[in-house]
């Protein structure tokens, strides 16, 4: 597995944990294709997720989170903005 794929995989695990915790849903329900709106995400949730991602070195603006639809989209955005990303 390439370093880029390994990094994205790590980011994805972190994103899934943050989404599950923020939205109080079982981690098993959070997959790459899960739609945030299907989990009940609202603007307050996006702000909380943006803050948590920032704490993990993945600065993502809540406005950007509101523009994406799936957990995979959040992973891509977070991976792009992750500290140390190449």
Image (tube, rainbow, N blue to C red):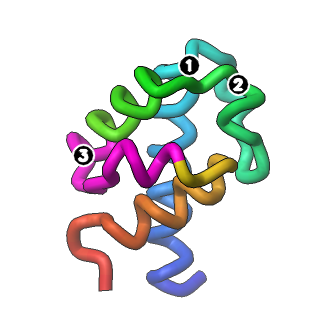
Q: Earlier in the sequence, mark 3 or mark 1?
A: 1
Circles 2 and 1, Cβ within 8 Å, touching? The answer is yes
> Dot 1, how many residues are within 10 Å of its Cα: few (below 14), some (14-19), or many (20+)?
some
Q: Is residue 54 above or below residue 59?
A: above
Residue at 55% of width from left, 52% of height from top?
A: 67
Quarter of the picture holding the C terminus: bottom left
Q: CA distance from mark 2 to mark 3?
A: 21 Å
Q: Earlier in the sequence, mark 2 or mark 3?
A: 2
Tag 3's secondary structure? helix
Residue at 74% of width from left, 41% of height from top?
A: 35
Between 83 and 4, the one nearer to me in the picture: 83
Q: Which residue is mark 2?
A: 39
Q: Earlier in the sequence, mark 2 or mark 1?
A: 1
Q: Position of residue 1 (x, y in %)?
A: 60, 82
Q: Which residue is mark 1?
A: 23
The residue most toward the top is 24
> Dot 3, how many residues are within 10 Å of its Cα: few (below 14), some (14-19), or many (20+)?
some
Tag 1's secondary structure? helix
Q: Which residue is mark 3?
A: 54
Q: Is residue 2 above or below residue 13?
A: below
């Amino acid at each position: 597995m390439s370093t880029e794929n390994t990094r994205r995989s790590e980011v994805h695990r972190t994103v899934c944990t943050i989404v599950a915790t923020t939205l109080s849903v079982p981690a098993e329900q959070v997959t790459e294709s899960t739609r945030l709106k299907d989990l009940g995400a609202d603007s307050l949730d996006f702000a909380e997720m943006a803050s948590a991602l920032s704490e993990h070195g993945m600065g993502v603006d809540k406005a950007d989170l509101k523009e994406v639809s799936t957990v995979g989209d959040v992973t891509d955005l977070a991976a792009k903005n992750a500290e140390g990303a190449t």
